[in-house]
Amino acid sequence: MAHFGPKQEKEYQRKRSLQREVLELLMLYGPKKLDTLSTDFAIDRRVNIQPVLDALKDARYVEVGENKDKMVQITASGVTRLEML
């Protein structure tokens, strides 16, 4: 098993916290446009959440629509993950 140093542990916790925030936001307010979601996090937290969204999408916790609006919505497994975080 690999051991993380303090810097890697802090980064891991930050990403996990952002994942929880994104899932909570989608759970509370429903689907949001990808651009709006990214902008909200960039303004409020000065962070680029694209890597977090990519990880959530790869894990199938969120779905991103293929149309021009690219609506992001939480999936059933995303709801389950949110309950575990």
Image (spheres, rainbow, N blue to C red):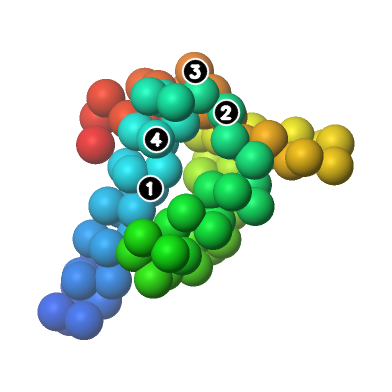
Q: Of the residues tagged 1 and 2, which is closer to the observer?
A: 2
Q: Give the amino acid type for the residue marked by disc 3 in the picture.
A: Ala
Count all numbered tags in the image, as a single digit.
4
Q: Secondary structure at mark 1?
A: helix
Q: Along the polypeptide, which appears first: circle 1 or circle 2? A: 1
Give the quarter of the figure containing the N terminus. Answer: bottom left
The residue drawn where x is 64% and y is 47% is 34
Quarter of the image where one finds residue 8: bottom left
Left/right of residue 12 with respect to residue 50 in the rendered view: left
Q: In the image, which disc is placed on residue 19? A: 1
Q: Along the polypeptide, which appears first: circle 4 or circle 3? A: 4
Q: Position of residue 24 (x, y in %)?
A: 35, 33
Q: Position of residue 75 (x, y in %)?
A: 54, 23
Distance between the alpha carbons at the discs numbered 4 and 2: 9 Å
Q: Secondary structure at mark 3?
A: helix
**Residue that label 2 marks:** 31
**Residue that label 3 marks:** 76
User: Which is nearer the eye, 51 or 46?
Assistant: 46
Q: Along the polypeptide, which appears first: circle 3 or circle 1? A: 1
Kindly give the residue lying farthest to the right in the view shown. Answer: 67
Q: In the image, which disc is placed on residue 25? A: 4
Q: Give the amino acid type for the residue marked by disc 2 in the picture.
A: Pro
Distance between the alpha carbons at the discs numbered 4 and 1: 10 Å
Kindly give the residue lying farthest to the left in the view shown. Answer: 6
Q: Give the amino acid type for the residue marked by disc 4 in the picture.
A: Leu
**Quick check: 67 above or below 18?**
above
